[in-house]
Amino acid sequence: MAPSRISPTPPPNLDRGLTPSQLDTFDADGYLIIPDALTPGTVSALLRETHDLLSNFPLSTHPLTKFSTGESSDHVGDDYFLTSGDKVRFFFEEDAFDSGGTLTKPKERAINKIGHYLHALSPTFRDATLTTSHTAIARDLGFRDPRVLQSMVICKQPEIGGRVPPHQDSTFLYTDPPSAVGLWIALEDATVDNGCLSFAKGSHRRAPVKSRFVRKTDGGGTEFVEVAGSRFPKGLEMEENGKAEEEEEYTLGEVKAGTLVLIHGNLLHKSEKNLSQKGRIIYTFHVIEGENEYDERNWLQPPENGFTRLHQSVNEGL
């Protein structure tokens, strides 16, 4: 793999948005690494909230739903998952169970992710999501009506944190045309040993969104279907004669806690299994363009009041 690339040092106040140099990097590479985007105090508060959530959810009423990346088993698609868009729910690592289905780890060390409505139901995560700086970043990326449609803590647990194969976020959060951008925040250091991200630099310009993750029409779970609409965002300058996905070279993205990584929805990215003794907790949320079509086939459906406006004040009702 190629060595990691750190973007230029951000301005002291992200409330001003992105610098021209940062925008150029994001446009060229499809991702942008911004060190020290969150203060140590905010990172500590988010970690405390994460550990409280992991400690306090009850096992006795949990369906033990596992989150699968689709490599060793089908993607998750049960009711617990499909109705999580306006709730805070807990999804287990596949390798947290033995062959007989018995949990082999303490629950705090067995969860793959917590989602998908932290930005609304947890005041701590809400305050770290609906911020002036994130609104300014979205504005600089060209959003007119940025909507937060999901938020997650991903734990990447020691020894069992699963590998995530190359994927594009717009496959799972499809709008027509595609518009998803991920805001990925390290709450602990992410290294090659504990499964940091890696990126196929520039692939957002040559990799169309060919499939999308949807609810089956018979109501029984989820599936991938071919994209019938636009496969690239509006106005994106595409590369011709692009590489095949299997020919892409990946750049490691090792980062310190407090780092924000912006990820274009068409960008191919992945992470390897965590076989180390150290976890890698991160918080991520995704923004889509509210003016673009988001249909009823998508696995994630909006809450009663619609997806959350990013510029919405934390004092407003959600």
Image (cartoon, rainbow, N blue to C red):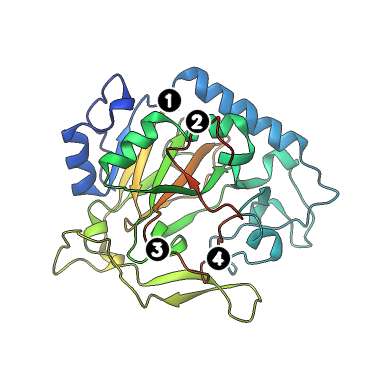
The residue under the point 34% across, 74% down is 229
Element on which disc 1 rests:
loop
In the displayed structure image, the side of residue 186 where residue 56 appears, left or right: right
Element on which disc 3 rests:
loop
Element on which disc 4 rests:
loop
> If you read the primary sequence from the N terminus, does the residue marked by circle 4 or circle 1 appear first?
1
Which residue type does callout 3 highlight? Answer: Thr
In this figure, which residue is indicated by the disc labeled 4? 299
The residue under the point 28% across, 27% down is 16
**How far across and down, in percent of the image, does residue 62 sit?**
79, 52
> If you read the primary sequence from the N terminus, does the residue marked by circle 3 or circle 4 appear first?
3
Residue 206 vertical placement versus 307 (above, below):
below
In the displayed structure image, the side of residue 189 where residue 32 appears, left or right: left
> If you read the primary sequence from the N terminus, does the residue marked by circle 4 or circle 2 appear first?
2
Alpha-carbon distance for marks 3 and 4?
12 Å
**How far across and down, in percent of the image, does residue 100 sit?**
79, 62
Which residue type does callout 4 highlight? Answer: Trp
| Residue 26 figure quarter | top left
In this figure, which residue is indicated by the disc labeled 2? 128
Q: Are marks 4 and 2 in contact (CB under 8 Å)?
A: no
Q: Nearer the viewer, mark 3 or mark 4?
A: 3
In this figure, which residue is indicated by the disc labeled 1? 38
Q: Are marks 2 and 1 in contact (CB under 8 Å)?
A: yes
Q: Are marks 1 and 3 in contact (CB under 8 Å)?
A: no
